[in-house]
Image (cartoon, rainbow, N blue to C red):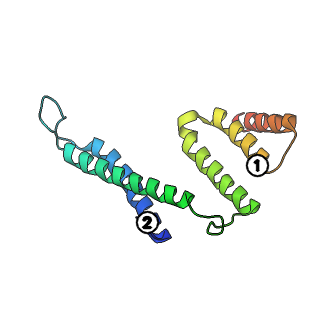
Amino acid sequence: MIKSKGELFFLLFILLGSFILFGDTFYIKGGQDIGGRLGPAFWPRTILVGIIIICVSLLVEYLIKRGRMTETMKPRLDLRQLRFLIAVGLITAYLVLLPLVGFIIITPLFMIAFMYLLGEQSKGWILGVSLSLTAIIVV
């Protein structure tokens, strides 16, 4: 059970590292897992899947127990902090999705979401600015 923020960050660090190492197991040379023979990547993958399952189950347990906290125990998050966290999430999502989706598709969507987050109400202005700025950058 997770008892502190330090333990939570360590758990997330282990989870991220396990995903990275699992991806690296696909570069192990020396044969495939074919015909009843286990290749050299079988045991590292099995161990990493076990680590990922344990980390995810501990994270789910933490989130469930945190959801049961009373209102007086919950930390308060004001609107500015929430907008900041959403902005960081939008930027992170943009950077992750950029190579997968492409600049021309993801940039206007990002700009629309960010302008809405900043408080712009006019839908025509939001759409016009995002599409025209993307077109100017592409040209």
Q: Position of residue 11 (x, y in %)?
A: 41, 62
Q: Residue at x 55, y 59 (%)?
A: 68
x then y, percent, for residue 122: 88, 39
Query: On the picture, is 1 further left or further right than 82?
Result: left
Q: Residue at x 59, y 34 (%)?
A: 102
Q: Position of residue 97 (x, y in %)?
A: 56, 40
Is the residue marked by circle 2 packed among few (<14), some (14-19), or many (20+) residues within 10 Å?
some
Q: Secondary structure at mark 2?
A: loop
What residue occupies the far top of the structure in this picture?
35
Q: Is residue 65 left or right of residue 18?
A: right
Q: Residue at x 43, y 66 (%)?
A: 2
| 2 vs 1, front mark | 2
**Label 1 near label 2: C-beta < 8 Å?**
no
In the picture, which quadrant includes the C terminus?
Answer: top right
Up/down of 61 relative to 29, above or below: below
Alpha carbon of mark 2 to alpha carbon of mark 1: how far? 33 Å
Q: Residue at x 66, y 57 (%)?
A: 85
9 over 121 or under it: above or below = below
The three-letter code of the residue at mark 1 reads Leu
| Frontmost residue, 86 versus 107 | 86
Badge 2 is on which residue? 2
Please name whichever residue, 57 or 110, is drawn nearer the observer in this view of the structure. Answer: 57
Mark 2 and mark 1 lie on one chain; the one further toward the N terminus is 2
- Above or below residue 136? Residue 91 is below
Q: Considering depth in this image, is 102 or 47 the residue closer to the camera?
A: 47
Q: Residues within 10 Å of mark 1 (few under 14, many from 20)?
A: some
Name the residue that disc number 1 marks: 117
Does residue 30 appear to the left or right of 94 in the view shown? left
